[in-house]
Amino acid sequence: MTTAATKTPVEAKWNIKKVQEEAARVVASNCLAAQQVLSKYGEKALEEYKAVSRQFRVNHLKSLGVKTPIEIAKAIAEAEANIFGSKIDVAGDEKSASLTYNQCAMWNAIKELGKLTPEQEEKMGAGFETCMQDLAKDLNLKANVQMGENTCTVTFTK
């Protein structure tokens, strides 16, 4: 005998904090999974993944019409604050601008999911620095990354 299943619609009820936490967790888990799998195929595969991912980000920033250091810093900070719940300060002008991560939700999610060793944390920090420098270069800028004990500041300059 077959019985018809009762369907129950599911409504979106999460508050913004819960949505941001889940977004950070999902994106962090995808990044960690991609890096784990691709690292088995060598550095070339990992570099290609990073370049393709970065190009999507560059294309998005260009589609927003951002060009100056302050516009780029604001666009990055606004996206990360709204999507993931990161706490970021922005300062600067058309020639030089910085975004200071007072709390990076993605970094926190990666650390929690990845159970990183200090060596892995250092390597991921270096990877973030390279990523930001390459992103800036693709946008005809330069980026300087300063890692602090509890903060990270990225400064974009022309």
Image (cartoon, helix red, strand yellow):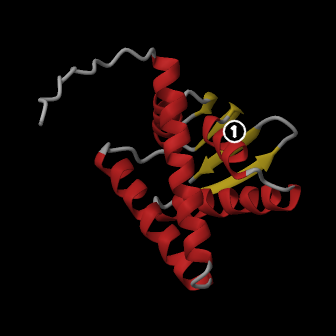
Residue 34 makes an appearance in the image = yes
| Residue drawn where x is 66% and y is 56% of the image | 128
| Residue drawn where x is 69% and y is 38% of the image | 108
47 sits left or right of 116 in the view: left
Residue 156 horizontal/vertical position (percent): 61, 48
| Nearer the observer, 62 or 39 | 39
Q: Secondary structure at mark 1?
A: helix
Which quarter shows the C terminus? bottom right
Which quarter shows the N terminus? top left
150 sits left or right of 18 in the view: right
Q: Exactly how many numbered labels are in the figure?
A: 1
5 sits left or right of 90 in the view: left
- Dot 1 crowding, Cα within 10 Å, few <14, some 14–19, many 20+: some
Q: Residue furthest front?
A: 1
User: Looking at the picture, which amino acid does disc 1 mark?
Assistant: Asn
| Residue drawn where x is 17% and y is 28% of the image | 5
Q: Is residue 105 above or below residue 135?
A: above
Residue 44 horizontal/vertical position (percent): 56, 84
| Nearer the observer, 43 or 37 | 37
Q: Is residue 103 above or below residue 126?
A: above
| Residue drawn where x is 48% and y is 61% of the image | 140
Residue 73 makes an appearance in the image = no
| Nearer the observer, 115 or 44 | 115
The answer to which image quadrant residue 36 occupies is: bottom right
The answer to which image quadrant residue 93 occupies is: top right
Q: Mark 1 highlights which residue?
A: 108
Residue 91 horizontal/vertical position (percent): 63, 30
The answer to which image quadrant residue 148 occupies is: top right
Q: Is residue 64 above or below residue 10?
A: below
Q: Is residue 8 above or below residue 63?
A: above
